[in-house]
Image (spheres, rainbow, N blue to C red):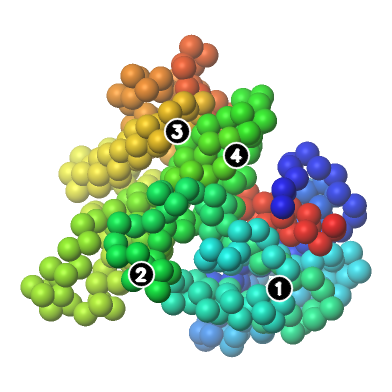
Amino acid sequence: MTIPNTEDATPAAGRVLVLNSGSSSLKYQLLDMRDQSRLASGLVERIGEETSRLVHTPLAGGGGESRERTGRIPDHDAALRAAAEELAADGLGLDSPELAAIGHRVVHGGLRFTEPTVITDEVLTEIERLVPVAPLHNPANITGIRTARALRPDLPQVAVFDTAFHTTMPEYAARYAIDVETADAHRIRRYGFHGTSHAYVSRKTAALLGHAPEDVNVIVLHLGNGASASAVAGGRCVETSMGLTPLEGLVMGTRSGDIDPAVTFHLKRVAGMSADEIDVLLNKKSGLVGLCGDNDMREIRRRIDEGDARAALAFDIYVHRLKKYIGAYSAVLGRVDAVVFTAGVGENSAPVREAAIAGLEELGLVVDADLNAVRSSSPRLISPDYARVAVAVVPTDEELEIAGQTFALVDN
């Protein structure tokens, strides 16, 4: 199915509630798809703990003051009910006839789910079957789906998969060079993640350049606490840095990214670490936090300015990995029209952008220092006019992408 450009389309009246369920959190946004405006957003965190917290922000009419409540919220069912109460207080309740659908972020869709999908019992069963390849994410997504279906069984519920955008990768890019029978038996291959962000940003970048997505080749660098790169040729992903799990690829806030697989064997044999301990090390105690003790790029830059050698080395390792992927994906694409930075670090850290592009003039990449220093919430070019390849900053909007895909499906 072709998803219409949600930035320009003006669909029939209808609201979409977007839910992003984590293991102990629930993020939500309510959007009006007539004009892609946000009506409300919120976060419920520390679900199941004694000190749960809900922050709700009404956004209709230009925004409003956030409301906060604390106290124990035992599970996701209670969390969604609490969020529904806050929405109802603004006249935006889940029982509103204006609510057309609920869109769920689901991290892993495997090979079966290549498009947004209306959730049925069969679909939910298949998402459950994918838990072994997404044990940290899919269980929480499933919990949110079950809660929302229980609260509004009459309403279409749509799963939008992080992996879907990357299913266009050719087989030679998606397969690992291990025994085929073993790989197939255990679903081992590169799936990729952050797909809604890569889809949205690559499309917005094409618009920024004044071209249709099918006419543009883009390298997207999604740099947040989790980080990933993608090579997008004519609107289709042909390569991405994350793999079977979100651990592979770039240096991240707490994840190692690319590493020799034999490191895991070495840690087991020499350090006596268990598989679970190695998992925690590579996913939660590595990356920037493992290198220098901080995963906030602003704090790392402050430490560098004060002469901190560990912070400087962490920054250099982070940037070096970015350069490797920019170069590799330039080779994969052959022709690159733009390199685009997005997500928290990509959108806000001028030093990261400058350092990642520095020295790549032979690839046609140059950053204008003055343009790079500008802070803006709008898509913008930070390369000079004479640059052969555009360098851009495009704020991501995964919630709008999920809402757009959800509404396009249920409105047909």
Please name the residue shown 52% across and 45% down the image: 237
**Residue nearest the viewer, comparing 92 with 244:** 244
Q: Name the residue under label 4.
A: 235
Badge number at residue 333: 3
Which quadrant of the view contains residue 71?
Answer: bottom right
Q: Are marks 3 and 2 in contact (CB under 8 Å)?
A: no
**Mark 2 and mark 1: span between their CA atoms?**
31 Å
Residue at the left extreme, as displayed: 270
For the question of whether residue 54 can be seen, the reply is yes
First in sequence: mark 1 vs mark 4: 1
**Badge 1 amino acid:** Ile
Taking the image as shown, residue 340 lies to the left or right of residue 151, namely: left
Please name the residue shown 63% across and 34% down the image: 213
Badge number at residue 73: none
Please name the residue shown 60% across and 64% down the image: 113
Badge number at residue 181: 2
Residue at the front extreme, as displayed: 181
**Badge 2 amino acid:** Glu
First in sequence: mark 3 vs mark 1: 1
**Badge 3 amino acid:** Leu
**Badge 4 amino acid:** Gly
**Residue nearest the viewer, comparing 306 with 164:** 164
Secondary structure at numbered mark 1: loop
Q: Mark 1 points at which residue?
A: 119
Secondary structure at numbered mark 3: helix
Q: Compared to 409, does 150 lie above or below? A: below
Secondary structure at numbered mark 2: helix
